[in-house]
Image (spheres, rainbow, N blue to C red):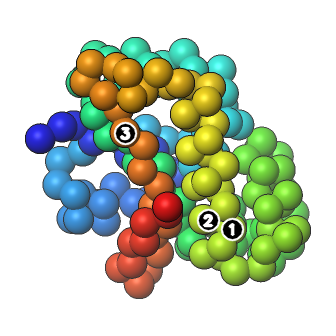
Amino acid sequence: MGKKLFLICPFSRLEGFLQSHYGEVYFMTAPAAVFSAVAAETQEYLPDFVQAEGITDIYLVSDAGCPFIEAAIEREPSQGLACEETISRISGKETSPFEIARQLVIQQLAFLAERVLPDGEKRIPPVHFHGLVSYRAENLISTVA
């Protein structure tokens, strides 16, 4: 069985929740799980980590209860983080926290596949991307196709 890496928001506190569903896994964090907002660091460290640890599956997880998503819906003042701009562009079109989280997952998976690990399927072992929207408060996990 391959090793799994979950890309999550540290403020959503998903580690224990995801481990209860997926067992022992690795985690990498970025505010709101918007890794494109920390593109230089992601592009520098993620490929090396994936190779060194033999990661075969990368899960990008956005929690509908993420404090950044909730703040965008409530139109609270920005904290000055780059992820907030990304969320505000999506929340201007969407009002459901689940739909905002889903759109974030789709956007970030595209970033990872195109800019960070474009050779994911060709690697030995291959790296597969998965998208999940969670709502930890309700013990829900949904796959994003």
Q: Amino acid at mark 3?
A: His
Spot occupied by residue 80 in the image (x, y as percentages of width and height): 82, 46
Front of the two marks 2 and 3 = 3
Q: Residues within 10 Å of mark 3 (few under 14, many from 20)?
A: some
**From the viewer's perspective, is residue 82 above or below residue 125?**
below
Q: Amino acid at mark 1?
A: Ile
Callouts 1 and 3 close, C-beta under 8 Å: no
Q: Nearer the viewer, residue 111 or 46?
A: 111
Q: Identify the element where label 1 is drawn.
A: helix
Q: What's the CA distance linking mark 2 and mark 3?
A: 20 Å
Q: Is residue 47 left or right of residue 54?
A: right
Residue 121 sits in quarter = top left
Q: Can the viewer see residue 66?
A: no
Tell me the tag on residue 101.
2
Callouts 1 and 2 close, C-beta under 8 Å: yes
Chain-order first, disc 1 or disc 3: 1
Spot occupied by residue 52 in the image (x, y as percentages of width and height): 28, 16
Tell me the tag on residue 100.
1
Chain-order first, disc 2 or disc 3: 2
Which residue: 70% across, 80% down? 96
Callouts 2 and 3 close, C-beta under 8 Å: no
Q: Nearer the viewer, residue 6 or 120?
A: 120
Which residue: 55% across, 33% down? 113
Q: Is residue 43 left or right of residue 58?
A: right
Which residue: 47% across, 75% down? 135
Q: Is residue 60 left or right of residue 71?
A: left
Quadrant containing the N terminus in the rendered view: top left
Residue 15 sits in quarter = bottom left
Front of the two marks 1 and 3 = 3
Residue located beneath label 3 in the image: 128
Q: Nearer the viewer, residue 117 or 65?
A: 117
